[in-house]
Amino acid sequence: MDRINKTFVNEFILLGLSGYPKLEIIFFAVILVMYLVILIGNSVLIIASIFDSRLHTPMYFFLGNLSFLDICYTSSSVPSTLVSLISKKRNISFSGCAMQMFLGFAMGSTECFLLGMMAFDRYVAICNPLRYPVIMSKVVYILMASVSWLSGGINSIVQTSLAMQLPFCENNIINHFLCEILAVLKLACADISLNVVTLAVSNMAFLVLPLLGIFFSYMLILYTILRMNSATGRRKAFSTCSAHLTVVIIFYGTIFFMYAKPKSQDLLGQDNLQAREGLFSVFYGVVTPMLNPIIYSLRNKDVKAAVKYLLSQKSVNQLRSK
C-alpha cells in the first residue's frame, strides 16, 4: 500500500481560500496577529507556572500543559498556512501532510483528556477539600498528564497510519487549509469503512467520555456549592471553576459547530462551502488557543498576581543592569 501511495501521490495541494485573493490578505494579517498572541500569552503562562511558587499546584500544572499543547498545536499548522496565504505556495509533501495530521490529531486528543483531568481536579478541590492533597499528589497529577499525552499520541498514530496508507490515485487536491483527516479521507479511492469505525471509536473515547466526565464533575461541584452556607465560599468556588468551564464551552462548542452543522447548508455551493470551512478551521485552530491564556489571566487572581510579579522582577533586573 505504501508503494501505491508513492506511485500516485507524492504531494497534496491545499486549496484554502484560493478563490478569494482579497480574503487571503485579510486572513494572513489576522492569523499572524493571533499566532503572536498565542505564543506570547501561552509562554507567559508557562513561565509563570514554573517560576512562581504560588502556582505550583495541580491546577496550574495542567494549565501549563494546556498552554504548551496550544503552542505545539498552532505551530504545527499556522506557519505553513501563513506561507500559503502570502506566497501562494499550496503544495505539501506526502510526509509533511502525514506529520501535520499526526500533530493536529495528537494535540486535539490530548487536550480533550487534559480538560477532563482539570475538571476532576476542580471536583476534588471543591467536593473533597480535606483529601485534596492526598488524592491530587504530585505523583498522581503528573501521571494524569502523562496518560493524557501518551493516549493522545497513540490515538493519533493509529488514525494517521490508517489514513495515509490508503491509495489516493492521483486525486491530491484537499479542500482545506490543512491536512485535516476528514478532508484527506475524501480523496481516497478505496474503502474507508475501517477508518470511519476507528474514528467513531476515537470520538467516543476522546470527545464524548471526557465531556461526560466534565459534565458529571460540574454537576457534583454545583451540588456542593449550592449546599455551602457562606456566600463568600460559594463565590470563591464559582470563580475557581469559571475559567476552566469557559474554555471547555469554547473548545467543545467549536467542535460541535464545525462537525454538526446542517447538511442543507452544503447547497449554498462549493465556493461558499470552501470559504466557510476555512473560517471554521481558523476559529478552531487559532482563536481557541488564543483565548485560553486570556481567559485564565482575566478570571484568575493568582495568575494575574504571578504575571505582575514576573514583570516587576524583570523591571528591577533591567534597572540593576543599568
Image (tube, rainbow, N blue to C red):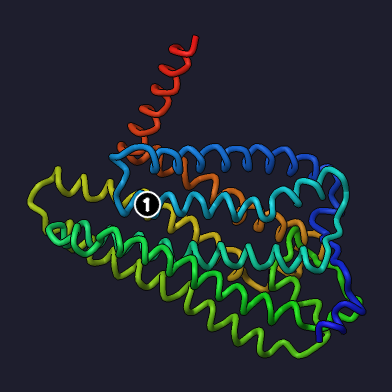
**Residue 266 screen position, x and y as percent:** 73, 69
Return the residue nearer the eye: 276 or 17.
17
Return the residue nearer the eye: 320 or 167.
320
**Residue 239 screen position, x and y as percent:** 28, 46
Residue at horizontal 33 percent and vertical 61 percent from the top: 141
Kind of element beneath mark 1:
helix
Return the residue nearer the eye: 125 or 211.
125
Residue at horizontal 40 percent and vertical 29 percent from the top: 310
Q: Amino acid at mark 1?
A: Phe
Q: Residues within 10 Å of mark 1 (few under 14, many from 20)?
A: many
In the displayed structure, 96 sits above or below 186; it is: above
Q: Residue furthest front?
A: 321
Q: Is residue 66 left or right of residue 236?
A: right
Return the residue nearer the eye: 82 or 57.
57
**Residue 11 screen position, x and y as percent:** 86, 67
Q: Disc 1 marks which residue?
A: 61
Residue 165 position by quadrant: bottom right
Residue at horizontal 66 percent and vertical 58 percent from the top: 281
**Residue 12 screen position, x and y as percent:** 85, 66
Residue at horizontal 74 percent and vertical 65 percent from the top: 179
Q: Residue furthest left?
A: 229
